[in-house]
Image: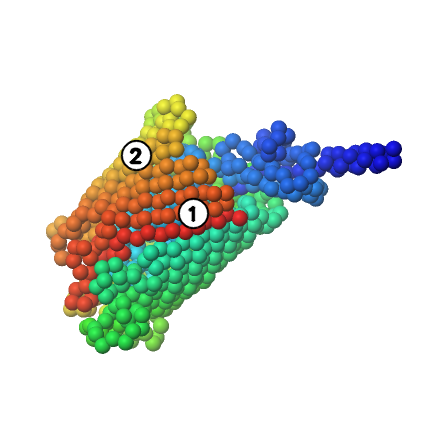
Amino acid sequence: MKNTIITLILVAFATITNAQNYFKAKVLESESNEALIGATLLLKGTNNGVSTDVNGLATLNNIPNGKQTIVITFIGYEDEKLILNFPIETAKLHTVLLSTSDTEMDEIIIEATRGNRTVANLPTRTEVLTEEIDEAASMEASKIAHLITHSTGIQVQTTAAGSNGAVVRIQGLNGRYTQMLKDGFPLYGGFSGSLDILQIPPLDLRQVEYIKGPGSTFYGGGAISGVINLLTKKADKDETLLHINLSHIGARDFNAFTSKKFGKWGFTNLASMHLHIPYDANEDGFSDIAQVSKFNFNPKLFYNPNQKTSLYFGATISKENRKGGSMDKIKNLNTSSSYFLDEQESSRITSQFSAKYKLSKKNTITLKNSVSSFYRYINIDENILGTSTTFGGNQLNSFTELNFNINKETQNINIGFNSLSDIFSEKHYLSNQLRNQEYNTLGLYINHLWDISDKLAVESGLRADKVDASAFQSKNDGQNFVLPKISALYKLTPELSVRLGGGMGYRMPTLFNEEAEAYGYRNVKAVDFNSLVAEESYGSNIDFKYQSTFGLDNVLLSLNQMFFYNVIDNPITLNDNINNLFYEQLYDSLFSKGFESQIKLTVGKFTWFLGYTYTDAYLEGEDKHSLTLTPKHSIKGDLLFVVEDKWRIGWDYDYKSGQFLNNGKITESLFTTGVIVERTIDNFVIFLNAENFTDVRQSNAGSVLNNGSPQFAEVWAPLDGYFFNAGLKIKL
């Protein structure tokens, strides 16, 4: 009897204990920190669930002891899974942040526009990549070059064969006309421009935004051909990702991303290491891929003291060394033969700060600041010609912006002020003629977005800039620019819409262009503001979009047809006069016009994408000259098969027609293709990627060397040929 009583007491105690387990949570929208009403909390494997109230609060009761999984869901948002070991501190209130789902591209919030509108309701033509990021990380774990070229009309152009530097070209225009951002902060170009896209690993990216055409209202005169905004992950959930990649041509990548949320605080960090041995694809004794060692460290701290305030602190610390040219010299082998060696080292320290405060439910004020210090040293040893070139210095940049965002029921108004400082100091011991330069820009802007009706939305903007600049014994007394823009969206039917837009821009003369990069800045004279003024531009585009599911759950068809027209007046070029290189203003006009056609079809587990671009880019004055390294016809696309949490198999292809070279000749056309296979097993992803397996490379059409000296300015085809890589991704 005594044992029976004891047993009954123990059972009753266990029952009471289990009944006492509960989970209290507050569910918020990750971007705005606003409460989500009607979100569901479900104990996995049971029917035990509850919904959040008007304050986003909910309590899930009757949770058994042991390890349990709680799933939080809300329509239009990504599911959140919490694995907890009960009993826990039941008095604790858990804050759960849900992010918008990426399943419908048209519903993704665009942050580059400041107004945080969805793609479907934005008059400015905008493209977004989300799901492609993970795939691109498997193809190129150390840089974003492959990722950002996924969009039609965008080309990554190699600037120098020795160092493998590269820039991003949009709609046929040179890389200097493209504005790149990361989390809305400018990725400073200038001396670092050809290395920026090579130094950013994609592991911590959550979204890539493309705005093609003039984007100067928010970002200043440099956004002539377009804007690319890279958005990183936030600390809205606990996550640890590891990425290991190896390639048969000598690449080794080790990347780690960590995200941690604890109360009002959050923390993320990306640590990456990229090592690459020199690789000679055609065995001519010259490196087609430079020897590289690169390290990145990107910590970020988030703090949300209340529902109205959000703070963000970030930093970037990076260091890179690259060495290209003669293989024996790179390997430090004793050689009496002629050689060429391009050595570069660079380092960057950047700070970022952002404070956002909600003045009311819909109105916000945001303060941003970033400071960047970038050092780079170039040493080109060319004993073939008996010459040696050294160039280097420090580039100091700062950016500050104050933005007021006013939201009304049918209108959004952005009013802002920003300042930009760019100071380059050449090191004394590297040059007899210091090519220092300094730019200070003050800008005011206003942008108005008005939903006139359910079918019609209009966006208009105006920016005013004042730029003071100076360079080696010349000074610009201050140029003023007024930059208007306007765009409109009209929905002809729920499936068919048309966008029309146009705007103006400018770009100040600078020492740092891809033409000078090709020479390692050897014999390049400083900018002369007594004879050079800013390049000024205007551009327009019209875009038609059709999207339909045809009433089917597993089918989505999207068609895009865009026409573009860009003009740059008074373009600046680098003139070569018997090895005396200087910038010259051409009082002609540079034109870039053409169209882009895109189709994307999803049927069940298959997605097919095809994009075609026609580009007619030329300089017109007394004579008409086609722009070099700009294919008139280009095709890119891919076919993707996905079984969620199991398989991802992709095939991509890229075609470029012949390109004009500086000598007037036209290159042969190019077709490259690749395949990627990923297998997911629990928290592990194994991937195998084969790129350019048809082995298309420039050396197949002739030597990259000219009298032993690389043709830096004429790199028009892949240098490395085919390669395959494999690796492992781990999610902890």
x then y, percent, for residue 455? 38, 27
What amino acid is found at the position of numbered circle 2 in the picture?
A: Ile
Q: For the point 32% across and 66% down, which residue is it?
A: 323
For numbered disc 1, what is the local secondary structure? Answer: strand
Query: Badge 2 local density, few (<14 within 10 Å), some, or many (20+)?
Result: some
Q: For the point 44% across and 39% down, which residue is it?
A: 646
What amino acid is found at the position of numbered circle 1 in the picture?
A: Ile
Quadrant in the rendering for residue 345:
bottom left
Tag 1–tag 2 contact (CB < 8 Å) = no
Question: Foreground residue, 454 or 707?
Answer: 707
x then y, percent, for residue 78? 51, 37
x then y, percent, for residue 661? 17, 55
Q: For the point 29% across and 37% down, which residue is it?
A: 610
Q: How does the figure colour the protein chain or chains? A: rainbow
Instruction: Locate residue 582 relative to residue 69 in the image: left or right.
Output: left
Q: Mark 1 = which residue?
A: 686
Q: Is residue 727 visible?
A: yes
For numbered disc 2, what is the local secondary structure? Answer: strand
Please determine whether, in this image, residue 94 is positioned above or below residue 512.
above
x then y, percent, for residue 640? 35, 38
Question: Foreground residue, 40 or 286?
Answer: 286
Q: Where the N terminus falls, by quadrant?
A: top right
Query: Badge 1 local density, few (<14 within 10 Å), some, or many (20+)?
Result: some
Q: Mark 2 = which residue?
A: 599
Of the residues under marks 1 and 2, which one precedes in the sequence?
2
